Image: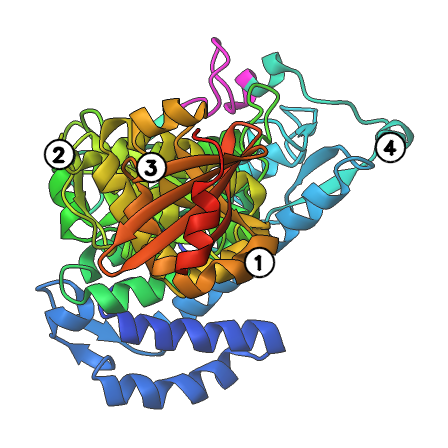
Amino acid sequence: MWQADHARAFTVAKVANLDLLATIRQSLDKVMRDGGTLEQWKAGLVPELQKAGWWGMVENKALTGTDDPVFVGGRRLRTIYDTNLRISRAAGRWKRIQEMKDVRPYLMYVSIGDNRTRPLHRRWGGNDPAFPFRIILPVDHPAWAVFYPPNDWGCRCSVRQLSQAELDRLGYRVTTDAELERIGWMTADGQVGGRLRTFWRKGAEKPEAVPVGVGPGFAYNPGVSGMQAVAEKATRSLEEMAPLDLKAARYTLVDLVKSDAFLETLNEPNGVFPVMILGDEARAALGAKNHVVVLSSDSYAKQRGLTARSAGHTDLTVPDYRLLPRIGAAPDHVIRDRDQHVVLWKLDGERYLRAVVKVTASGDQMYLQSYRVGEARNLAREIATGNRVGGKVDVPPASPETGPRVAATVALDRLGPDATRKDGRSAMQALVEAAKADLPATQAALEAFVASDRFAAVVEKMGEAPALALADDLRRLLGAPSGIARIARDNLPAIIGDIDGLGAFTQEPDEIRRDGQDAVLIRRVGDRTMMLRLRPKASLLQIIALRVLQAEELAAILELPIW
C-alpha cells in the first residue's frame, strides 16, 4: 500500500469485496476503541474470514481483486493490525497537536537512536554527530505533510510538541531552510521532499517518487491525509456501486455525509467529499460518465463565507449541507444551465435550495460549484427558458405559450403554511410578471391555488394571499398599478362560500359602480348574479367581499355612481 492507500482508514490490501472490508473495518474499530490485543482481534475475526472464504490460499478475484493467488494467514493479519493501529494513533496524535498548537507551536522529530533505527531516521532525530542539530519546525510547516512519522514499516520515530519556553529552556532552536536542504528534507528552491528515489508499484503504469529515507507509501501525514483518503475511497466505491444499485449507493452516501468524516475532510486544505449521486436526467444533461458529485473544501469555505475573500451564503448551515444527497437523489427541478452545468432545485419546507453542478470537459468528474437558498421567481425564470430537463415535480414543459403559467405555478407552489412574508412578496412579483405575459394562464394557476387545501392556511399564516388576476384594461380602468388582487384574513369568511365564482371577474364585468373608495363589480354567471368588492390598497387591490346577489341587493348597487 502507498500513501493514498495507507491513509484510507482501514483499507486492507487484497480485499475487493465491500462487505468483507466492512467486516474487517468494524472489528478493527472495536479493538482500537476498546483497547483489545492482536490475539483478541484475530480470535473474533478469523471465523468471519473463513466463512467469507478469505482465509488460507484464496483464488477468488471477487474477494481479492487480483488474478493471482493470495495467501491469508496470521502474518497478513498482523500486518493489517500493526499498520492500521500505527496510522490510527498517528492521526489521533496529529489531532491533539492541532488542538495545542497555540500554546505549543513547534514539533521536534524524535528517533530512538538504537541499532534498529534507520541511519537517516537517527540523523533526523539529532543522533548523528555529523549533523549536530535536531529537526524542529512549526506545527504547520509543510514538511510535516511528508515527513511526519512513522516513515516506513516498523518505524518507531515520533514527534514531541514544544512551547517557546520549552525550546528556550532546552537550548533548542528552529531548523533553518539551509539545514533542511542539507539533511534532505528540502530542495535548494524551497520544495519540500528533498532528494527523491523512484519505485515501481506492481501493476502501475508509471513509477512513483518518494523522498530518500521514507518508505513507499509513507510520504504523507496520516492526521492530515486520513480523512481525505477516506473520502477518496468512498467516492470510488460509490462510483462503482451506483451503476449496480443506485438506491443502495444513495443510502450509503447519506450515512457518509452524516459522519464526522464529512466535516473533518471539508475543514482540511484540499479536501474533497462526495455529496450527491445524480440520476440519469441530470447526468445526460451534463454528459457525465459517472453518478457522483463531489464538494471541495475550497468551495465549501467560499460558499459558507468562511474565507476573507468571500461573504458566502451564511443562511446555509451544516445540516443544510447534509441535505445534499437528498437534493441529488430527488430534485424538484433539473435545469440545464450554460455548457457543462445543471441547476438542481429542491423545496425544503418554506424555502427552495438551489445547487449548481459542473462537469469537467472530459465528463469524468462532477463538482458542486454553488449551493444557496434560491428565490421562487428565479426558479420560475429558469423554467421559463425552456431548459428544464427533469425533476419530480410535474409542470408543463416551458415554451413561449406555457412559460408564464409555469412561472405562476412555481411562484404559487412556493406558498404554503410555513411561507414567510418574503415568500409572499416573491410570489406576488412573479405573478405580476406572468399576468402581463399570459393572463389566462396566470388566472388558471391562481384558480388552482385558491381551490387547494393550502389557500386558507396561507391566508391565515401570512394575513393575505393572491387570488385574482385582472385583465390589463380592467386594471387601468380601476387605476390599479398591478392587476393582482388578494384576499386578507379578515375578509376571507365573507368570501370563502362563493370563491368558486372569483374567476369570472378576470375580464371586464357587466357593471362597475363606485362605493366610496371601493369598486363594486357585477357579473352574471349562469343563473347567478355575482358581486365583487375591490379596494385599492398600496400597489395592489384587496378583495373585500364576494357573494351572490339577491334582486333587491342588485337594485341598490345599481343606484351607485358608475365607476
Q: Amino acid at mark 2?
A: Glu
Q: Of the residues under marks 3 and 4, which one precedes in the sequence?
A: 4
Tell me where the magenta segment starts and ends, as one range. 181-195
Q: Residues within 10 Å of mark 3 (few under 14, many from 20)?
A: many
Residue type (three-letter) at the residue carrying disc 1 = Glu
**Contact check, label 3 and label 2, Cβ < 8 Å:** no
Name the residue beneath numbered marker 4.
170
In this picture, is 294 found above or below 241?
above
* Residue at 24% over, 27% down: 437
Which residue position holds label 3?
Answer: 379
**What whole-number distance in Å separates the C-alpha atoms at marks 3 and 2?**
18 Å
The secondary element bearing badge 4 is classed as helix
Q: Residue at x 59, y 50 (%)?
A: 463
Foreground residue, 502 or 275? 502
Label 1, label 4: how far apart the Cα atoms are: 73 Å
Within-10-Å neighbours for mark 2: few <14, some 14–19, many 20+? few
Identify the image's colour scheme: rainbow, by chain, secondary structure or one colour. rainbow
**Residue 500 x %, y %:** 33, 59
| Magenta-drawn stretch contains 185 | yes
Which residue was labeled with disc 1? 460
Q: Which residue is mark 2?
A: 401
Label 3 and label 1: CA atoms lie apart by: 25 Å
Q: Position of residue 155 (x, y in %)?
A: 52, 51
Q: As shown in the figure, which amino acid type bears the numbered disc 3?
A: Leu
Q: CA distance from mark 1 to mark 2?
A: 33 Å
